[in-house]
């Protein structure tokens, strides 16, 4: 299934994408795509629905029908840094001996096609296409062998980053990662049965039609099961939490010379089987 949330900001309703690319309303069955709706039993009930019986929503998604973030009421937005060897190299850093874990504030979350805002005082706003993992069944101290039982699905994330805030403002990456609009999620949450081999997903990102990132989850250093297990050692994972798993090379900071967003650009990014995002870049 491709689960989604549609409608105006703050008024999103739950839905799913049918085989014709149209949105079907799930409001009669769940309140939102969030929390306990993502537990295995709840997902199984949605799988059992006859999609053709669900109300058809007017409009074409990502055209004249806005999509919100594909997960609502996210409790934790956990991110992994330097998880692609070639991205670590372009950043001038070694692959870490353990995953680098940091957080994005949940107030950064927006829809997949909402505007990205450059924060005041920014000179180095950057982009990062990433595979997002959405937690279904919660837990802590999760065994790596059991980790996929805790995954409700996958999505596209743009881990927008302000590099000066991140690296040069007296510590913690979080300062450069959590500005408003720095966390577009979606367009849909795709359940694992539809994704298949998540270790072989092509991923890309373009700015104004120029392709900067062109990678694959195949080159991820720490894989999804390990990341779920690892994060659960330091925090309990709960339904609807999101883990953003790192980016391949091609970020603006890694260009020679570096290229950063100034305002007025259009970012497009996507991951095979998970959809495409498009964002207009504005100045706050």
Image (tube, rainbow, N blue to C red):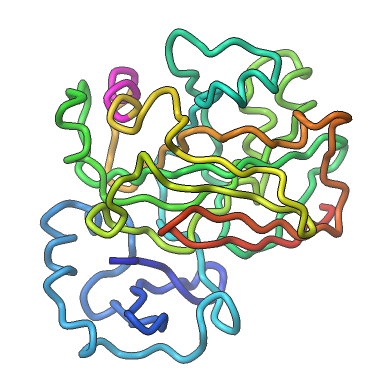
Q: In this view, does 255 lie to the left or right of 103?
A: right
- Give the magenta range: 228-234
Q: Is residue 195 left or right of residue 110?
A: left
Specify whether residue 209 is painted magenta.
Answer: no
Residue 180, image x and y in percent? Answer: 66, 47
Q: Depth check: 236 or 48 in front?
A: 48
Residue 99: image quadrant is top left
Determine whether 11 is above or below 146 in the image: below
Residue 2 x %, y %: 34, 66
Identity of the residue drawn at 34% across and 58% down:
190
Q: Tell me how many marks there are.
A: 0
Q: Nearer the viewer, residue 221 or 78?
A: 221
Seen in the picture, residue 173 relative to 51 is either above or below; the reply is above
Q: Quadrant of residue 32?
A: bottom left
Q: Which sits in the foreground, 76 or 93? A: 93
Residue 26 appears left or right of 118: left
Q: Quadrant of the N terminus?
A: bottom left
Query: In the displayed structure, does residue 69 sit left or right of residue 254?
Result: left
- Please tell me which residue is depicted at 59% across the width and 10% down the height of the picture: 94
- Residue at x 24%, y 47% (from the top left corner): 136
Q: Quadrant of residue 171?
A: top right
Q: Give the x, y percent position of residue 98.
A: 43, 12
The structure residue drawn at horizontal position 52% and vertical position 44%, both measured from the top left corner, is 106
Where 38 falls versus 127 (above or below)? below
Q: Nearer the viewer, residue 8 or 92?
A: 92
User: Residue 85 location in percent, x, y?
Assistant: 54, 21
């Amino acid at each position: 299934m491709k689960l989604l949330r549609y409608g105006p900001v703050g008024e999103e309703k739950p839905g799913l994408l049918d085989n014709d690319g149209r949105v079907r309303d799930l409001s009669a069955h769940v309140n939102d795509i969030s929390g306990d709706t993502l537990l295995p039993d709840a997902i199984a009930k949605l799988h059992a629905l006859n999609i053709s019986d669900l109300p058809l929503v007017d409009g074409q998604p990502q055209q004249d029908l806005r999509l919100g973030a594909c997960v609502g009421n996210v409790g934790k937005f956990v991110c992994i840094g330097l998880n692609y060897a070639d991205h670590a190299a372009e950043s001038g850093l070694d692959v870490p001996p353990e995953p680098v874990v940091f957080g994005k504030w949940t107030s950064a979350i927006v829809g997949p096609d909402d505007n990205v805002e450059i924060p005041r005082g920014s000179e180095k706003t950057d982009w990062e296409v990433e595979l997002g993992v959405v937690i279904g069944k919660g837990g802590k101290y999760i065994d790596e062998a059991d980790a996929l039982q805790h995954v409700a699905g996958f999505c596209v994330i743009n881990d927008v980053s302000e590099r000066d805030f991140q690296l040069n403002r007296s510590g913690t990456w979080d300062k450069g990662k959590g500005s408003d609009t720095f966390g577009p999620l979606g367009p849909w949450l795709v359940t694992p049965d539809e994704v298949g081999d998540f270790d072989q997903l092509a991923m890309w990102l373009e700015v104004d039609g120029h392709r900067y990132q062109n990678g694959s989850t195949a080159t991820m250093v720490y894989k999804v099961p390990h990341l779920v297990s690892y994060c659960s050692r330091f925090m309990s994972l709960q339904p609807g939490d999101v883990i953003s798993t790192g980016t391949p090379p091609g970020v603006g900071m890694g260009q020679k010379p570096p290229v950063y967003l100034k305002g007025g650009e259009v970012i497009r990014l996507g991951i095979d089987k998970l959809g495409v995002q498009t964002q207009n870049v504005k100045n706050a």
